[in-house]
């Protein structure tokens, strides 16, 4: 017995240790000369053992998983191996770890919901107080705004499962996404309701609940519809993703977002109507302390009286602690908005914005060009999962020195035919000729041992006259695998259960290379294997590699991402054009969406996020989310252009920002705050979603409140200049034509005796 590495000699047979021993350091030849060492192995880091078992006939798939879990549990919990740290990898354990990731995320939905409710109540309180529309019913609006998306999510789950879609643990992210995105619509409706109520009270118009709610829906309905449909379409495009789990996430989320839109304009609007009825009753009950002349004061008094002493004291206490005075701050806000719109509409701002945008686009494009496709299974696990540590060990010790391909020969034919046998052996030699192959002595190919078996038989039984089965016949192959030293080859060969004929087999060929842990290099090697197998289609040669499913997606991820993004952007354009027929406004909205998405794509790469199925889905999601920001400002600016009461560009922009500025800030802050709760779960998926949403919200709010308004003002100024120039040219041309006509002989008799002027028309009726 010779315990050497990489080949051990045991009872006259060579045993390959390369599939089992890794991180091996050996003694050099000088150290081995004195013969004091039983093995040339000086140090050993990792030992890999493969356990295979025959499935009992009465076992189901669940029984197999139970057996795998039992084996893994024993090694993870045993105290009998204190000096050895064991890692157990099996399909059942891998699935359990993926499930654990989802189940760990799920409880934090309630934490995020509580945070969202507190934030919603606080911001609705501040916004309503500034607009002098605070009432106790606003708390109901705020809490229901957070509840509606969760109702839509549960309904979507029920519908999808009833339609035959399976449930996956990745769907635990869906409530986070729907609540973070869907609550925005409710905030817009609350702000619109406050604005409509304030306008009706100040104008003294007697109206009913139906008219107010109709005006609210007319005001924000198109914006809500645009953003809801684009979000649903964006996730709908995610159904074309190559990864099944990501497709599942996109399908469920798209259904939930559509249902959230339906629930917002039905259930949530109905709840607002119920609360609005009580608020309108309170408007009619004017306290005696109010003189009835100042409508704003009257409204504030009504709210204080209606809410009761406790609410009034609480409101005063909070504002005193925050040192807020609604009236003074409202005036200061109006002054700030006026100055801000002056700044937006100036030519200096346009130039500065162009320079900053150029730098931003350059950085985004540079980051996008450096993106790298990568897909590793450990991205699906929690940070404390043993699978992460096991994967790191595998990348460090195993892959650089050992990886293998399994070659299945499904149609070997009659191997007694010399040409057929030569064809099989030629294929194996071609696989072994690939430069990174470890060597033919490490290939697990049963025919080589079978030939040694035939040689041994011919030598030992040369004088035996008994007729033996022909070599390579099914009967002789059966005899071969019955020998104890060759019994393991039975797992590599397949015989027909009815005819006992030899039908197929497989073999493994090992490879090594320091760059084998790099996925792009592994993909290159995978292509070489497939090219060889394609040359031997006549014998049914195909290859199998454990992670080929992931490697196949590397090349397709970038093209699919680009195609899906372009298709999604086209859908966004169509939806925007339906509600904003002005091509000028639609182009600005679509350009802004493209700019935001480009920034997200580029800065995600700079933020150390590779292109993989999870980041692909977040990029598609970002397109849908990015619509929310430019759509609102461009739509409101478009509507102000249809209103003749707005006579200047500054007035149009001020009205637009006043209508959607606070709701956009409210929506953005709530989305980021809620999604940050995902960071309680330390896993790659949470990290990607948080980074993507922080980027799209940050870039989106910057575009909505700074970039797009500046561009709208700049282009409107240019358009107004061209119109004025055209009008001046038209007026000048008209004056020239009048002068030429006055010089004609026909007009000379109408000239005044003094000067070259056309006489005024005399009114004959007046002279009479």
Image (cartoon, rainbow, N blue to C red):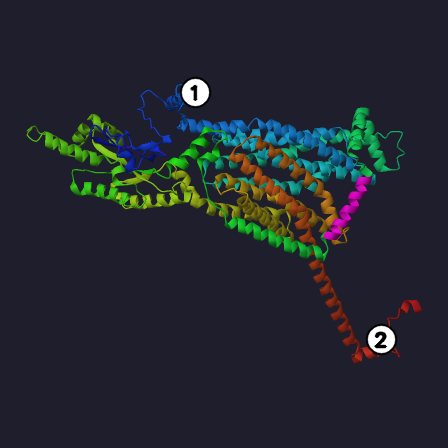
Residue situated furthest front in the rendering: 34
Can residue 201 be spotted in the picture? Answer: no
Secondary structure mostly seen in the magenta stretch? helix
Question: In the image, is residue 334 part of the stretch drawn in magenta?
Answer: yes
Query: In the drawing, does residue 584 fall left or right of residue 239?
Result: right
Residue ID at (75%, 28%) = 136
Q: Which percent across, then down, holds residue 157?
A: 53, 30
**The residue stretch that appears in magenta:** 328-343
Q: Nearer the viewer, residue 147 or 543?
A: 543
* Vertical placement of residue 534 versus 18, above or below: below
Question: In the image, is residue 199 part of the stretch drawn in magenta?
Answer: no
Residue ID at (43%, 29%) = 94
Q: Which dot marks residue 757?
A: 2
SS class, disc 1: helix
Can residue 105 be spotted in the picture? Answer: yes
Residue denoted by label 1 = 77
Between marks 1 and 2 in the image, the one whose residue lies nearer the viewer: 1
């Amino acid at each position: 017995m010779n315990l050497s590495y990489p080949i051990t000699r045991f009872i006259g047979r060579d045993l390959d240790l390369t599939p089992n021993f890794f991180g091996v350091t050996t003694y050099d030849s000088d150290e081995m000369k004195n013969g004091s060492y039983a093995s040339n192995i000086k140090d050993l880091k990792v030992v890999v053992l493969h356990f295979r078992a025959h499935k009992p006939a009465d076992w189901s798939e669940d029984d197999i998983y139970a057996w795998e879990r039992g084996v893994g549990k024993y090694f993870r919990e045993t105290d009998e191996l204190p000096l050895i740290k064991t890692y157990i990898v099996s399909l059942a354990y891998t699935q359990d770890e993926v499930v654990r990731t989802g189940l760990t995320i799920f409880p934090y939905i309630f934490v995020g919901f509580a945070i969202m409710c507190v934030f919603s109540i606080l911001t609705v309180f501040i916004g309503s107080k500034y607009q002098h529309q605070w009432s106790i019913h606003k708390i109901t609006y705020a809490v229901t705004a957070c509840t509606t998306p969760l109702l839509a999510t549960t309904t979507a789950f029920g519908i999808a499962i009833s339609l035959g879609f399976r449930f996956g643990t990745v769907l635990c992210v869906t409530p986070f996404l729907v609540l973070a995105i869907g609550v925005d619509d409710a905030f817009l409706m609350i702000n619109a309701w406050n604005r409509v109520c304030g306008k009706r009270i100040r104008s003294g118009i007697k109206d009913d609940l139906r008219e107010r709610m109709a005006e609210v829906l007319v005001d924000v309905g198109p914006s809500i519809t645009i953003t809801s449909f684009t979000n649903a379409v964006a996730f709908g495009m995610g159904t074309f993703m190559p990864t099944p789990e990501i497709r599942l996430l996109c399908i469920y989320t798209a259904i939930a977002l559509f249902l959230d839109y339906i629930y917002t304009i039905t259930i949530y609007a109905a709840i607002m109507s119920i609360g609005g009825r009580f608020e309108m009753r309170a408007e009619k009950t004017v306290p005696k302390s109010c003189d009835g002349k100042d409508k704003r004061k009257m409204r504030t008094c009504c709210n204080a009286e209606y809410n009761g002493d406790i609410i009034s004291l609480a409101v005063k206490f909070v504002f005193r602690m925050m040192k807020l005075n609604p009236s003074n701050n409202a005036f200061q806000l109006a002054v700030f908005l006026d100055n801000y719109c002056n700044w937006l509409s100036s030519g200096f701002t346009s130039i500065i914005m162009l320079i900053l945008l150029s730098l931003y686009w350059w950085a985004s494009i540079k980051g996008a060009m450096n993106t790298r496709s990568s897909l590793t299974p450990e991205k699906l696990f929690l940070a404390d999962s043993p699978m992460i540590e096991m994967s790191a060990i595998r990348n460090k010790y195993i892959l650089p020195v050992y990886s293998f391909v399994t070659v299945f020969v499904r149609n070997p034919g009659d191997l007694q035919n010399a040409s057929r046998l030569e064809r099989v052996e030629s294929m194996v030699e071609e696989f072994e000729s690939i430069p990174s192959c470890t060597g033919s002595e490490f290939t697990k190919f049963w025919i080589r041992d079978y030939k040694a078996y035939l040689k041994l038989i011919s030598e030992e039984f040369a004088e035996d006259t008994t007729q033996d089965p022909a070599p390579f016949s099914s009967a002789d192959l059966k005899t071969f695998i019955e020998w104890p030293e060759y019994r393991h080859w039975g797992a590599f060969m397949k015989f027909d259960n009815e005819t006992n004929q030899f039908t197929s087999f497989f073999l493994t060929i090992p490879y090594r290379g320091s760059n084998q842990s790099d996925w792009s290099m592994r993909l290159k090697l995978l292509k070489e294997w497939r090219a060889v197998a394609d040359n031997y289609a006549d014998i049914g040669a195909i290859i199998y590699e454990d992670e080929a499913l992931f490697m196949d997606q590397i090349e397709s991820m970038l093209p699919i991402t680009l195609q899906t993004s372009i298709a999604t952007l086209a859908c966004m354009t169509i939806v925007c054009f339906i509600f904003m027929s002005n091509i000028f406004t639609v182009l600005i909205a679509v350009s802004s969406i493209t700019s935001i998405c480009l920034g997200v794509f580029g800065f995600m790469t700079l933020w150390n996020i590779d292109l993989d199925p999870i980041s692909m889905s977040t990029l598609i999601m970002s397109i849908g989310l990015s619509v929310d920001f430019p759509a609102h400002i461009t739509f409101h600016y478009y509507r102000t252009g249809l209103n003749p009461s707005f006579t200047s560009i500054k007035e149009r922009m001020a009205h637009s920002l006043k209508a959607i500025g606070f709701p956009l800030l409210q929506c953005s802050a709530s989305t980021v705050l809620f999604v940050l709760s995902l960071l309680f779960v330390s896993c790659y998926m949470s990290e990607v979603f948080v980074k993507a949403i922080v980027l799209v919200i940050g870039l989106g709010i910057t575009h909505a409140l700074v970039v797009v308004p500046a561009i709208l003002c700049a282009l409107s100024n240019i358009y107004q200049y061209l119109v004025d120039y055209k009008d001046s040219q038209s007026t000048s041309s008209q004056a020239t034509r009048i002068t030429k006509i006055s010089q004609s002989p026909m007009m000379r008799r109408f000239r005044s005796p003094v000067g070259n002027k056309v006489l005024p028309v005399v009114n004959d009726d007046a002279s009479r």
